[in-house]
Amino acid sequence: MMRSQNIVDSFRHAFAGLWYAFRTQRNTRIHLTIAAGVVALGLWLELSYTQWAVLVLTVGFVLVSEILNTVAEALVDLVSPDYHPQAKIVKDVTAGAVLLGAIISVLVGLLVLGPPLWARIF
C-alpha cells in the first residue's frame, strides 16, 4: 500500500472510506436515517443555532463512533481470523462504545428537541 501522493488523493481515500462504511454497515445507515429524521424535526421546530450545533456534534459523535467500530472490527478480523477471547473483547467494547454514544444522543435529543416539540404540540 502506497502513501497518498497529494492532498486530493488523501481526500479521495477518506471519502472512499466513508462510502465503504455507509454502503456496507447496516448500523451506520440506521444512524443516518435517524439523523435525517432529527434534521427534519429540527427544521420543523425552527431550532436556534446553538441547538443545531449541539445536535450536529451529537450526531457526528455517533457516526464517528460507528465508523471507528467498523475499523476495529475489520482490524480484529485481519489479525485474528479465528475466534480469540481478546478479539471478542475488542469487538464487544467498541460496540458498547457506540451503544453508549447512541444512548447519550437520545438523551441530548430529548433535551434539545423535547421542550420545543412539547410547546408546538400542546
Image (cartoon, rainbow, N blue to C red):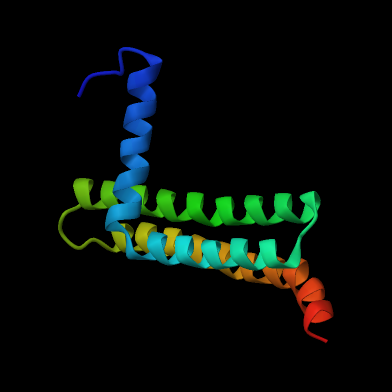
Q: Quadrant of residue 91?
A: bottom left
Identity of the residue furthest to the top in this view: 5
Q: In this view, does 103 lie to the left or right of 82?
A: right
Q: Is residue 98 left or right of residue 46?
A: left
Residue 20 place in picture, x, y as percent:
29, 47
Inspect this view and state whether residue 96 appears: no
Tell how many labels.
0
Q: Residue at x 67, y 57 (%)?
A: 55
Determine whether 95 is above or below 110 in the image. Answer: above
Identity of the residue furthest to the left in this view: 82
Residue 77 place in picture, x, y as percent:
22, 52
Q: Residue at x 46, y 60 (%)?
A: 32
Q: In which quarter of the image is residue 45?
A: bottom right
Q: Residue at x 46, y 65 (%)?
A: 33
Determine whether 45 is above or below 18 in the image. Answer: below
Residue 116 place in picture, x, y as percent:
80, 72
Identity of the residue furthest to the bottom in this view: 122
Quadrant placement of the C terminus:
bottom right
Q: Which residue is drawn at 78% across and 84% down?
A: 121
Determine whether 10 is above or below 15 in the image. Answer: above
Q: In this view, does 108 lie to the left or right of 17?
A: right
Inspect this view and state whether residue 110 appears: yes
Q: Which of 74 and 67 is in front in this view?
A: 67
Determine whether 5 is above or below 34 in the image. Answer: above
Q: In which quarter of the image is residue 81?
A: bottom left
Residue 101 place in picture, x, y as percent:
57, 62
Quadrant placement of the N terminus:
top left
